[in-house]
Image (cartoon, rainbow, N blue to C red):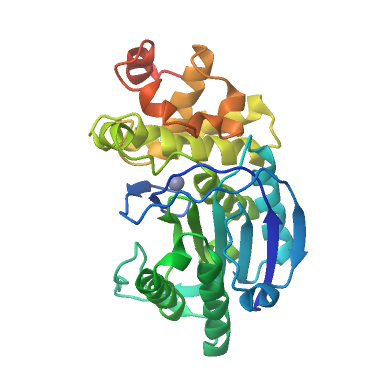
Amino acid sequence: MVKCMTRVVHAILLPVLLALLVACGSGEVADNDVNDNPTSSNMATGEVTTAEEETSDEAGSERPQDSSTVTLLNGSSLDDGVLLGWAGLAEGQMQSRVSNVLMLVYDVGERIEPLQEIPESESVEHEKLLSQEQIDSLMAEFEAWLDADGCMSQNAEYRADEIEVYRRYLERGGDASHMRALCPQTRVVGIGLTDSLRNREPASETEVFVLHELYHAFQQDLEEEGQCRTAGDAEDSTTRWMVEGGAHYFSTMLLVNGDQDKGRELIYEQARQSLSESSGLRENSPDRKGAAALLLMIDNQLIEHESVMDGSLFHGCAREFQFGNSEPGMESIEDQWSQF
Ligand SMILES: [Zn+2]
C-alpha cells in the first residue's frame, strides 16, 4: 500500500559550504559522481530548534530557508515516524550541522525488463506505484522546498531542471539511491524503495541504506573546491574510499546500536565478501572496503571512532589534507587494510 504523507522536521545548527553527488547501489556497490553546481555561501545562525509542522505551511512562505534542516517527503509505505526516527538518530550523532536536507522516499514496483535507463539518473525504470495525484503533490512540495532554499531560490532555471529530474524519477519508477548536492549546502537524499527491499530483504537493509545516504548529506566538506577537489579527483585519492567508507561505517555502527565489537565484526564480514570479488580498495564496494580501512586507521591511532560517527572526519577536507595517501601512516593503511 502506498500512502503520501509529508512532514517537516527542523533542526537548525551551524553553517559552512560544500556539495557533491554520491550515488550508491542499494547497499551494494557505491559509485561517486560529482556534479558541478553554483556555489553559495549562505550562513545560518547557531540556533538549535526542533519543530514539526505540515509542509503546506512552508509552501506559502517566501522566506529563504538558510537553516540546516531535514525535510521528509514521504511517498513510501514506510511510516513517517520510522523515517524521521532514522533521520533524527543520524543527525543526533553529528558534531555540527550545516546542510539543508530533503529526504524524498517513495516505493517502486518490479523492475521493467529489458532494462530501461532513466536519463540523467543512475536508475532504471520500475513499475510505478504512485498515482499521478501523489506525484503531483510530492513535486509541489519539492518545488516549495527548492523555492525556500537559500541557494536554489537564486536560480529559477536550475530549479526547473531539478524538478524535471525528480519528476522523471517518480513517473518512471526510478530506484533512486543517492545523495545529491544541488548546492554546497543543499542536499537531496533520493530513495526509491524497491519491491525487494520492501518485501524480501530484512528491514535492517532499508535502515542501513537510509542512514548511509543521510550520512552523505551530513558530510560537510564534499563540495570543497580547489586543492581538496583536485586531490580528491586523483585516481588513487583517499576520497575515493573514505567518503563511502565513512557512510558505511556510520550506518553499520548505528545498526548495531553503537556496539563497536559487533560493528567491527559485521564490517569485516562484508569487506571479506567484497574482497573476494576484487582486491582494490577503490573498486567494487569502496563503502565496505573503506569501512575496513577506517577500522585500521582507528587501530593505528590515526583517527578515532568518534570522528567518523560525529562527522568531524569530513570537516575541512581532512581526508586529503591530513590523510591523503602520501601523509604519514597512510601508506600502511593502503597496504594492510585487507589484512583483518
Ligand atoms: Zn554512498
Q: Which of 222 and 273 is in front in this view?
A: 222
Quarter the N terminus occupies: bottom right
Q: In the image, what residue occupies the spot 62% across and 38% down?
A: 96
Q: In the image, what residue occupies the spot 40% across and 73% down?
A: 156
In the displayed structure, 135 sits above or below 312; it is below
Q: Is residue 92 visible?
A: yes
The image position of residue 84, as x and y in percent, is: 69, 58
The image position of residue 155, as x and y in percent, is: 39, 68
Q: Can residue 272 be seen in this view?
A: no
In the displayed structure, 115 sits above or below 320; it is below
Q: Nearer the viewer, residue 334 or 84?
A: 84
In the displayed structure, 213 sits above or below 174; it is above
Q: In the image, what residue occupies the spot 71% across and 59% down?
A: 82
The image position of residue 241, as x and y in percent, is: 37, 34
Instruction: Report the number of discs.
Output: 0
Task: Indicate the quadrant where residue 76 lies.
Answer: bottom right
Q: In this view, does 223 lie to the left or right of 310?
A: left
Q: In this view, does 231 lie to the left or right of 302?
A: left
Q: Nearer the viewer, residue 183 or 113?
A: 183
Q: In this view, does 130 lie to the left or right of 168?
A: right
Task: Indicate the quadrant where residue 61 lies.
Answer: bottom right
The image position of residue 116, as x and y in percent, is: 30, 74
Q: Nearer the viewer, residue 6 or 119?
A: 6
In the image, farthest residue toward the left: 235
Q: In the image, what residue occupies the spot 45% across and 31% down?
A: 316
In the displayed structure, 41 sits above or below 152; it is above
